[in-house]
Image (tube, rainbow, N blue to C red):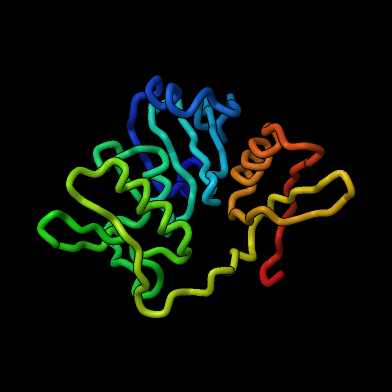
Amino acid sequence: MYERDHDVLAHVSRADFERRMGPPHGRDLEGDGLGPTDWWAWRADCGLTVAVLYRERTGRFHVFTGEEEIDHALAHLAWWSREVEWRADEGRPLAKNGWAVYRQDDTGNRHDVTVMPVRSHAECLARLLEARAHKQWYAVEARGTPPPQWSARPREGWAVIRQDEHGNRAEVLVHPSEEVARKLAAAYGSEPRHKQTYFVVPVAPGV
């Protein structure tokens, strides 16, 4: 997980990160054999799920979120390009179908920042970018044929399940990495939610 599955590799001050995001939600002394690793995991109000790992050996942060959400996750983390050493979508063309977040400056020039499959996430990213922009504004518009808003989840991997006091269950998300799914479940379970528990189950292809 620590090497092959992450979507962003970043180098930022650990102290600054903790001042903004708080202390880690957990610590893995072995780090899958790669040394002590601290981790954070949360779900933003817009629905974006992010897991961040910090490896002491390298002093680098690893971000897990999904390639189509990289810009969105970086905006929530308040990271610009100077913090990012590598990202999974580097050099790939923007999607032709979806919801485009575009930037327009005070002279009227427009530039697409990214194209995302979920409109509410694109609108959240536009708000985050505009809040820290100078003489620029951001908006969202359709490109091609936007996908349906229910957007299918990956059906192979590990599902985080929420269960209430009556035994009712609901799938929160599916992640290809069991370790990340378990960290997310632990993070959700640590939140002050009333009589709810979170656990992880495997999801077979096509289920």
Q: Position of residue 41 (x, y in %)?
A: 56, 38
Nearest the viewer among 115 and 180 is 115
Could you tell me which residue is drawn at 33 percent across and 32 percent down?
11
Could you tell me which residue is drawn at 71 percent across and 64 percent down?
204
Nearest the viewer among 75 and 194 is 194
**Furthest residue toward left:** 107
Among the 4 quarters of the image, the one containing residue 140: bottom left
Among the 4 quarters of the image, the one containing residue 154: bottom right
Asked if 61 appears above or below 71 in the picture, the reply is above
Could you tell me which residue is drawn at 43 percent across and 27 percent down?
20
Q: Position of residue 9 (x, y in %)?
A: 37, 41
Q: Position of residue 64 (x, y in %)?
A: 49, 46
Asked if 12 appears above or below 207 in the picture, the reply is above
- Left or right: where 131 falls relative to 98: left
Nearest the viewer among 30 and 90 is 90
Query: Would residue 71 be visible to someone looking at this image?
Result: no
- Left or right: where 92 falls relative to 123: left
